[in-house]
Image (tube, rainbow, N blue to C red):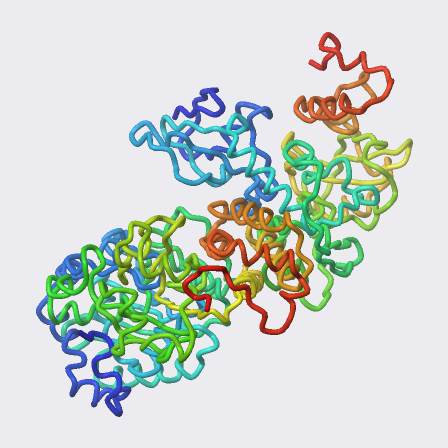
Amino acid sequence: MKVTIDNITIEVEPGTTIMQAARQIGPEVAPPAMCYYEPLKASGGKCRGCLVKVTAGSEKDPRPMPKLVPSCITQVQEGMIVENTINEQVLETRKGIVEFLLLNHPLDCPICDQAGECHLQDFSFEHGVSKTRTVEERNTFEQVDLGDHIQLHMNRCILCYRCVYTADQITDGRVHGVMHRGDHAEISTYIEKAIDNDFSGNIIDVCPVGALTDKTYRFKNRVWFTKPVEAHCDCDKCSGNVTLWYRGEEVIRVTGRKNEWGEVKEFICNTCRFDRKKTSDWTIEGPSKVSRASVISANKYGANTIKPAFPIKQAAEQYKKIDDNRDRSFLAPQKQLN
Amino acid sequence: MKILTEHINVPGIETIDVFRKHGGYSAVEKALKKMTPDEVTEEVKKSGLRGRGGAGFPVGMKWSFLAKPEGVPRYLVCNADESEPGTFKDHYLMWKSPHTLIEGMIVSSYALGANTSYIYVRGELMYVVNILEKAIQECYDKGLLGKNILGSGYDLDLFVQPGGGAYICGEETALLESLEGKRGNPRNKPPFPAVKGLWQSPTVVNNVESIAATSWIVNNGGEEYAKIGIGRSTGTKLISASGHLRKPGVYEIPLGITVEDFIYADEWCGGIREGHKLKAVVAGGSSVPILPAELILKTANGENRLMTYESLSDGGFATGTMLGSGGFVVMDETTCIVHNTLTFGQFYHHESCGQCSPCREGTGWMDKVLHRIEHGKGREEDIDLLVDVAKKIEGNTICPLGDAAAWPVAAAIRHFRDEFEWHIRHPEKATQKGAVFMREGASWTK
């Protein structure tokens, strides 16, 4: 099947979604995904961050679709033409979505463990605006302990339902879910029961924000000071393929391995995640591949390796407006980022 | 011309014997004994009957979309989760004459080939659930439900399921989720219920009033039904009239009477309460755009506005509204539109399921901003902010609740912007008890 996304045509299998097709083309055209998570069935369609404009439904019926469609759950048709980042309406709507997601978000990135690997940060950095229009008080929730290993900060949650699907699909018996409705909805175990099973730790990995945090890692470090290393062990519960996060010689965190879209490749068990924190527990394979766009790469491969050209350009525009005598020669075109 | 409510005030009409004396269940006999399911569907198609729950989608067409794979059960689900503020017609019909609905359910289930059907009733109406269950038991006793109905070889089991009282469960896919025993979150579409509905089987979800009308259509023929009404708005419609009227209540009107007649004629609502004037009308339940007096009586072209799907939506949202579910809320000049909009805003804030972000956050945001304006803490830029937030919700959500929350706010500002501005600029006056802005030269200003 032929589908055109942002003027790039690609051949895909029938049944592919617009999101999957866009990801096959590459990160430049892939819509942001806050709730969609490929390994989890039925995820997606909720955050509306990936809405795109379909300017031609298919070759047979080339009419445009009247509304923006969620690319993560819309299957491509032969000859479909999709506009993502080249469509004004899409970008404008995304600004709105960022605004909605941040409306009741505490913006406590400086003390949040997820900062640096947070999908909401990335999303708002790329598609949001720097100003807020709200003056209302934010909705707040109490922090909740979900057992020995997991802490829930409901304030940060964007209700993507990923952790609910994870518990449904990879653990035996889900004990948490979404309670209440609307903006007072919350992730909860109802009466603060513990989530206790061998694979519960994976809900931390799938959480796109800092709502579910690893208690063995909380406040230990910042992501950008750590070094991810691929390792495996002989585990009787899971594949044992993990990423170890080092600070110096110390393993401060263990997570599942993630692909370039931030999705876990293989879910790991709680023993690997929470109890095996010594290098001697593991067979080291080598350093993980770190994207140049990641905060971990920042300042490590020469200055200005962070790629997203759009926000950098925006920052440069803002910077130019500051009226003082600072040296601005580095903003000149010849030194612009590639 | 009355179709649904002809015998509604007959004493004992809720019992099967009295109901049958007045011609009840003749449609079941006719359909099951003399007609094939396709013939019933054909009659409903000919009637031009449109969905009475709000969207107005032709019922016959909806039925014909139902997928019919071999060996897979099909379901008919009656949406009796009537929770739209301003709408109370289904409640009235089920409470007074439960057999009218059950007769329609049997006929419709037969047409669709469903052997199990459900009536999903709003949780607050527990006594209606009891009335329906009693009526269903009567039908089982008389052989109108169960195995081999009236010797025709057709089996049907009918169940009543009370909901938990959530507005969102009136959205058809949320209703199906709830019926399956899950949290009432709307599903992403496609697939539509006609392909994958209840328990992943093909399902038709229809409003109480639509289903109830099918038995008359079977008895008298679709063409006869289509003679009532104007153009594509055929048949009769139950209107729940409320607000500052002399005679509020549920009226069965033939579609096509003028709005002016409906409000002022003695046959219907009998005019605005003594000594007051019409200011605004919400014509189809809280989610449709509000219209000021001059636009509800006449369209922008100066034609008389009629009680039809087409006439009410004449002029789009700029100068028109929608027939919706027929929740006709009338307001006189003592009504503060800002306060009214806040009430609607609070409702949608409370009822948003919280699944998709624009609706979850947007409804809460609009509620908070409206609350500030109403309580004298509004800012000039809040009006445009509300318009923009409404625009960002509209069309970007999983289900129509987002639209339903955005439209009333956008429409109130479109037609009554001066009232919002007055609230913001004169908070000391606006926050006084009973204070209402009087637009200079408006028809409702004394």
Quadrant holding the N terminus of chain A: top left
Asked if B52 appears above or below B300 in the picture, the reply is below
Furthest-top residue in this view? A334
The answer to whether A91 appears left or right of A259 in the picture is left
- Name the residue: 78% across, 58% down: A143
* Residue B309 image-quadrant placement: bottom left
Query: Seen in the image, is A172 located left or right of residue B184?
Result: right
Image location of residue A328, percent across then percent down: 81, 15
Apparent side of residue A241 relative to residue B261 in the rendered image (left or right): right
Give the tally of numbered discs.
0
Q: Kindly identify the residue that appears in the image at 57 percent across and 61 percent down.
A: B349
Name the residue rendered at 87%, 39% in the picture: A221
Q: Inspect this view and state whether residue A125 appears.
A: yes
Which of the 4 image quarters holds residue A119?
A: top right
Q: Position of residue A334 (x, y in %)?
A: 73, 7
Residue A289 can be seen, yes or no: no
- Residue A192 position, x and y percent, is 73, 65
In-front residue for pair A114/B46: B46
The residue that appears at 71% across and 25% down in the rendered structure is: A293
Q: A244 and A192: which one is in front?
A: A192
Q: Which residue is most to the left?
A: B34
Up-down relation of residue A306 to residue A272 (above or below):
above
The C terminus of chain A - image quarter: top right
* Residue furthest right in the image: A249
> In the rendered image of this protein, does residue A336 appear above or below residue A284?
above
Estimate the x, y position of residue B9 in percent, counting from the top left: 26, 87
